[in-house]
Image (cartoon, rainbow, N blue to C red):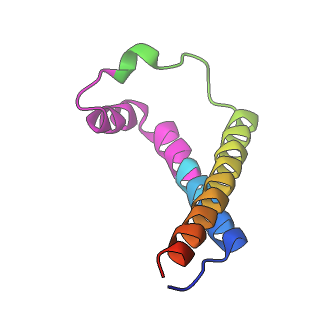
């Protein structure tokens, strides 16, 4: 098996999660109740309206969340690719 580029996988996952976070923020800004209902379906019907924030969305908080999830994705991608490379090398 080919080795994965650790940094490339990290960057790809980080950017992907950041983009998904931006899409989620946009959906929540346009359709807040429908977005909560949609994500409630992921949790098998858990009512997320109880945790709905009453504070308005601010651009700074959105950027903070997007950057935060991007960094988490970068780290997760680096860890994933590193483990993949060890496992793939060891299985030969």
How many discs mark residues in the rendered view? 0
Does the magenta-highlighted stretch encompass residue 46?
yes
Q: Is residue 67 above or below residue 6?
A: above
Q: Is residue 62 above or below residue 33?
A: below
Q: Determine which quarter of the picture holds residue 18.
A: bottom right
| Magenta span dominant secondary structure | helix
Q: Determine which quarter of the picture holds residue 44.
A: top left
Q: Residue at x 48, y 82 (%)?
A: 92
Q: Position of residue 81 (x, y in %)?
A: 60, 66
Q: Position of residue 11 (x, y in %)?
A: 68, 66
Q: Is residue 44 visible?
A: yes
Magenta-drawn segment: 22-47
For the residue pair 1 and 59, the one nearer the viewer reads as 1
Q: Residue at x 50, y 85 (%)?
A: 1
Q: Determine which quarter of the picture holds residue 5.
A: bottom right
Q: Is residue 15 visible?
A: no
Outermost residue toward the left in this view: 45
Image side of residue 92 versus residue 85, left or right: left
Outermost residue toward the bottom in this view: 2
Q: Residue at x 71, y 50 (%)?
A: 71
For the residue pair 10 and 59, the one nearer the viewer reads as 10
Image side of residue 33 versus residue 72, left or right: left
Q: Position of residue 32 (x, y in %)?
A: 43, 32
Q: Position of residue 37 (x, y in %)?
A: 31, 32
Q: Residue at x 48, y 38 (%)?
A: 28
Does the magenta-highlighted stretch encompass residue 54?
no
């Amino acid at each position: 098996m080919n080795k994965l580029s650790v940094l490339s996988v990290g960057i790809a996952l980080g950017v992907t999660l950041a983009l998904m976070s931006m899409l989620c923020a946009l959906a929540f800004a346009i359709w807040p109740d429908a977005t909560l209902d949609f994500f409630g379906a992921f949790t098998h019907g858990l009512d997320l309206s109880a945790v709905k924030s009453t504070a308005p969305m601010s651009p700074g908080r959105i950027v903070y969340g997007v950057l935060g999830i991007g960094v988490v994705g970068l780290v997760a991608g680096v860890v994933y690719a590193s483990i993949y490379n060890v496992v793939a090398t060891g299985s030969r």
